[in-house]
Image (tube, rainbow, N blue to C red):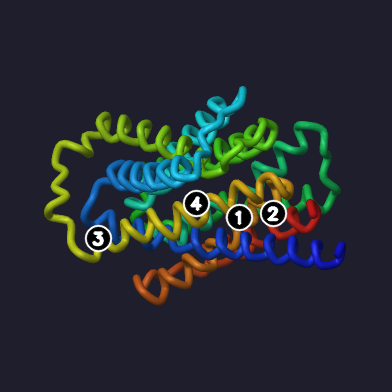
Amino acid sequence: MLASTTRSRSLLLISAFLVIYIGWGTTYLANHFLLRELPPFVIGTLRFLCAGILALLWALSRGATQMQPGNWGSALIGGLLLIAFGQGALIYANQHLPTGLLAMLYTSLPLWSVALEWLLGERPPFWALLGLALASGGIVLLMGNGLGTETGPLQWFSGGLTLLATLLWAIGAWWMRQRPPFHSSWLGLSLQMLIGALILAGLGLLDGDWQALRLDQLSGSGWLWLAYLVLPVSLGVYPAYFWLLREVRPSLVSTFAFVNPVVALLLGYLILGEQLSLTAGLACLATLTGVSLIILGRR
């Protein structure tokens, strides 16, 4: 019985990791196509508003409405740090950076996760620190040389914003792990998404995204990409991610950040015809090697 339970849990863990690895790896491509027709904060608002409403309706249909002290704080943390900032920055930066490069910058998430655990008293071994240094150097090299000759202030700002978003994501993931779980994971997910959508809508107002919005002019493929982000990605990946945060270390869950670039780079090459320079390729290799050292040390 024990062996069967252990095997079932292992299969669940593997399945959940595959879901977040592949699901979030395809997000960059979906955003790339949607940004041709919609402003960035409109995409984020519509995605999480629709997903949040669907998750809330599912929770209500099951009578899962019970809240406990601390749940609203968890919803605010997840909505603000993981969804509004984490995904909002990703969509915004996707306008100015190639999908593969953007995915590589998101590999800084495990760096922040391990650094945060270290600050809280869990000092990593020497070779994990070496991985931190190697990956950090790779990110700096990537930012300096991976953008090509057209690099300007907007590209640097987008890259810096992405790194800040990963830092806030790591803080939010650690913080949520310390708080009491929701009685209904779907209710918690819906509240986080709706709060995130509200914040993204406000950012869209400040950025002027809503003034020229014409949803009636959105193409059929645009609606399909939006539906993809709402259904299999938001309502499939996020439940798997939040479940994993309760089961294993946040630094292990953050390994999606260095698998996603492989998916994004492959899709960018096959579908978008994107190319990376040799220097950028070496920077990617250094970053992935460093992050791999860190993750192997945190098992």
* Residue bearing the label numbered 3: 222
Task: Identify which residue is drawn at 43% across, 37% down.
Answer: 84
Q: Which mark is residue 143?
A: 4
Query: Viewed as shown, does residue 66 lie left or right of 33?
Result: right
Q: CA distance from mark 1 to mark 2?
A: 6 Å
Which sits earlier in the primary sequence, circle 3 or circle 4? 4
- Residue 285 percent coordinates (x, y): 62, 65
Query: SS for tag 2?
Result: helix
* Residue bearing the label numbered 1: 138
Residue type at the position of mark 1? Gly
User: Given this view, does label 3 or label 4 mark the residue nearer the observer?
Assistant: 3
Estimate how packed mark 1 is, as few (under 14), some (14 to 19) or many (20 or more) residues with alpha carbons within 10 Å: many
Which sits earlier in the primary sequence, circle 1 or circle 3? 1
Estimate how packed mark 4 is, as few (under 14), some (14 to 19) or many (20 or more) residues with alpha carbons within 10 Å: many
Q: CA distance from mark 3 to mark 4?
A: 30 Å
Query: Viewed as shown, does residue 284 lie left or right of 33?
Result: right
